[in-house]
Amino acid sequence: MSKPFDMELFLVSVLTGSHSTRQRHICQAKTIQTAIAERWSRDNPWTWRRKHIAWFLINKRNGRSEATWYYYKLTIKLIIKRLGKQDALKHNT
């Protein structure tokens, strides 16, 4: 049995800001990871494609406020930065 992917370890090199900001990004990244894993069976961001992130952005808003959704988009940008795919979501964010 394999270990679950550690999102905190994945993001540590791109996280900046206060402790609470870093914790918020980690929590939101885990939420994104869980949603994509449940829908696409891909819990590892290295296996994600543009369609997975786009699907999350389109389908998982779930009544979140504009401010909260803004922070989710910032977290997605950090994930993309960590993956080294800066222009991956240019048209979706």
Image: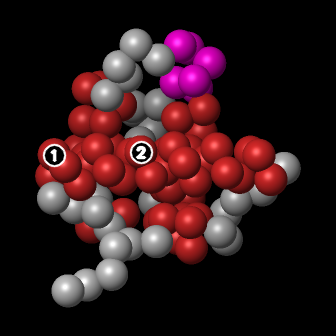
Q: Is residue 38 above or below residue 70?
A: below
Q: Is residue 18 above or below residue 7?
A: above
In the image, the segment drawn in magenta is: 65-70
Where the N terminus falls, by quadrant? bottom left
Dot 2 falls on a residue whose secondary structure is helix
Residue 80 position within the rendered picture, expressed as x and y whole percent measured from the top left: 49, 55
Residue 39, numbered label: 1
Q: Residue furthest left?
A: 40
What amino acid is labelled 1 in the image?
Arg
Q: Is residue 58 left or right of residue 10?
A: left
Residue 49, numbered label: none
Residue 31, numbered label: 2
Tell me which secondary structure the magenta stretch mostly adopts.
Answer: helix
Q: Which residue shows up at 53% across the image and 70% down it?
A: 10
The disc, 2 or 1, on the residue closer to the chain's N-terminal end is 2
Residue 51 position within the rendered picture, expressed as x and y whole percent measured from the top left: 23, 44
Determine if the magenta segment contains residue 1.
Answer: no
Determine if the magenta segment contains residue 67.
Answer: yes
What amino acid is labelled 2 in the image?
Thr
Q: Is residue 93 left or right of residue 18?
A: left
Q: Which residue shows up at 38% across the image and 72% down it?
A: 5
